[in-house]
Image (cartoon, helix red, strand yellow):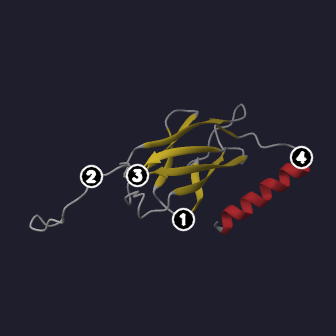
Amino acid sequence: MDKDFQLLLSLTLGMWMIRGLAPEVSLIGLPGTARLAENSKAGTVTYSFQVALSPGASLASGYPRILNSDPLTNQFTVSMINTNKAQVTVTGTTNLDFETSPNSFVLQILAVDSTKDLALQRLTVILTDVNEPPVFLDEGTVCV
């Protein structure tokens, strides 16, 4: 987590405690769990959720976004598809292979609005195995 964000988070949490207010940003549908078939292509929608803001507020530029993931990965991204619906998609930067990749990812999704209120929720993505046909590397070799 970068230092600027840590400061923002500390100040915002402190303001809520002083004012006694809860955050005005909600990520409806999160926390959540999604199942994703291995080898999913770039652009595959993994999960959709709603973003609710207080009246008069708008999302800050660049939000919602994945703040952190466990394990650390850039295989997923978040984008808004309309004013209140967001989706998590596969980036395609690397192949999501069940046999060689981690089988689950915990994504921390952050939304910040124009009044600096924020919401942080988790999405767990579980990679599922797909029965793949065998691949023969050498036509001349056959095992019986």
**Three-letter amino acid code at disc 3?**
Glu
Whole-angstrom CA distance, mark 1 to mark 2, is 30 Å
Horizontal side of 87 relative to 92 (left or right) equals right
Number of residues whose C-alpha sits closer than 10 Å to that of mark 4, classed few (under 14), some (14–19) or many (20 or more)? few
Which residue: 47% across, 60% down?
74
User: Dot 1 corresponds to which residue?
Assistant: 72
User: Dot 2 corresponds to which residue?
Assistant: 133
Query: In the picture, which quadrant includes the C terminus?
Result: bottom left
Whole-angstrom CA distance, mark 4 to mark 3, is 46 Å
* First-in-chain label (3 vs 2): 3
User: Dot 3 corresponds to which residue?
Assistant: 38
Which residue: 84% across, 49% down?
16
Instruction: Give the number of the mark in front: 2 or 4.
Output: 2
User: Dot 4 corresponds to which residue?
Assistant: 19
Residue 51 locus on image (x, y percent): 63, 37
Q: Is residue 24 above or below residue 95?
A: above
Horizontal side of 76 relative to 30 (left or right) equals left
**Three-letter amino acid code at disc 1?**
Leu
Q: Secondary structure at mark 4?
A: helix
